[in-house]
Image (cartoon, rainbow, N blue to C red):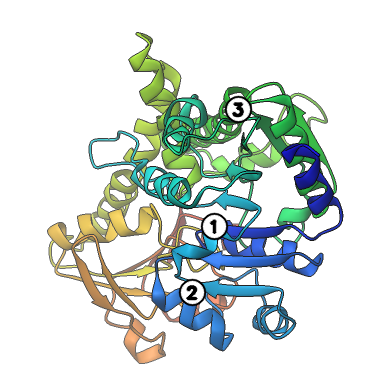
Amino acid sequence: MSRYKILKEKIDSKKAKICIIGLGYVGLPLAVAFGEKGYFVYGFDTNLSRINKLKKGDKYIVDIESRKILELIKNDKFLPTADKKVLGDCDVAIICVPTPLRKVKIPDISYVVKASKMIQKYLENGQLIVLESTSFPTTTREVVLPILKKSGLREEEDFFLCFSPERVNPGDKNYPPTKIPKVVGGLSEKSAQLAESLYSTIMEKVFMVSTPEVAETSKLLENTFRLVNIALVNEFAIVCNKLGISIWEVIEAAKTKPFGFMPFYPGPGSGGHCIPCDPLYLSWKAKKLGFKTKMIDLASYINHFMPKYVIDRVEELLTKQGKSFKEANVLVLGVTYKKDVKDLRESPALDIIEKLQKKTKKVDFYDPLIPYLEIAGIHLKGVPLFRESLEIYDCIIITTDHSNIDYDFLRKNAKFVFDTRNVYKQDFDNVKRI
């Protein structure tokens, strides 16, 4: 029997052992989903703190319940580990490692390369390798494949290789990962078919494309779509302010059109890994091919400009109140990149804090999910939201609109609030919106 048929039977009978490499927002929910369907799953991560937390059932990702993890561990369906040798014992290895941008805005695929080299060292006949980490088109074929081939094994004959972009939306109750259609693109037809069989056991729908490059680029198109539209509405917000018009009312009016319009909302910038970073992977690849992606680059510029715009607006409004911006005490409310999600990646709030520290007398922050900040040159401990403590701040900037904050209490006790998230739905004497 061929290696393809043997692995196909293991997948269909749920006897295939799966190793998820990287237990973050993508990898951990995936590991739990496979475990709950009856597969045995190794959860591999080099972060020993994560491994120890998982073994204790400590929660570090909002979408995963601790009891589910402990239950899977107890039932011998999930084993968190930092032992690389499990890569040789699995039938399927799925790479879910970070792909950040370097400071000079070029892709950093060092984690993907490292994971690929680990797999190559333990690669066995009949294994399926899937890359889920977002990257530039051709990463699977031109980066991962050559590394795996150093084992002496052949793709399609000895092992199988696919790309399947992650589509996780942290904190989204309506669309958990298993309800989001899964795109798969294999180096060979057999590889794609194996990946389709595998993901079909946990996903409601799997969409197979012709090549890994199509799958890689589809992910970048999804996030570029969001990047460009967020930048567009941010630019509209700036123009509307100049015109003395509420951008929020404009959006509500435009939303009444039942076709040809999708609402996006302005804010202090864009955060998370996907929107600020992923489109620049395509931009970088395009430059390598001699083409400049003007729309992507401009959208990225506008969104990165928004923290400065927020500060400029606050300075302007405080000056109108007769207050010195240099002597101002400012509280930044909410520092994660997204509402109710404990994730600081690319959060515009961090950029705002950094800039405020250079321009104002005092900067503090409050976030119900983040007790302290030791990141990007920022060293701050969160402050409480008491009536007495609010009195010292000349301005409170709402940068992330977490649900469990009493915004009515905030408005009644704050001197001035600048709302970048439309929490209040209207302006008040002491509240102005972006």
Q: Residue 247 location, x and y as percent?
A: 55, 40
379 horizontally vs 407: left or right: left
State the residue position of label 1. Answer: 88
Q: Quadrant of residue 330?
A: bottom left
Secondary structure, mark 3, is helix
State the residue position of label 2. Answer: 411
The residue sitting at 38% across, 42% down in the picture is: 113
Question: Quadrant of the image for the N terminus?
Answer: top right
- How crowded pointer 2 is (Cα within 10 Å; few <14, some 14-19, many 20+) is rated as some
Which amino acid does the dot numbered 2 rest on?
Answer: Arg
State the residue position of label 3. Answer: 212
Q: Nearer the viewer, mark 2 or mark 1?
A: 1
Q: Nearer the viewer, mark 2 or mark 3?
A: 3
- How crowded pointer 1 is (Cα within 10 Å; few <14, some 14-19, many 20+) is rated as some
Q: Number of marks in the image?
A: 3
Is the residue 284 above or below the residue 338 in the image?
Answer: above
N-term mark: 1 or 3: 1
Q: Nearer the viewer, residue 382 or 325?
A: 382
Which amino acid does the dot numbered 1 rest on?
Answer: Gly
13 horizontally vs 348: left or right: right
The residue sitting at 59% across, 85% down in the picture is: 57
Q: Quadrant of residue 147?
A: top left
Which amino acid does the dot numbered 3 rest on?
Answer: Pro
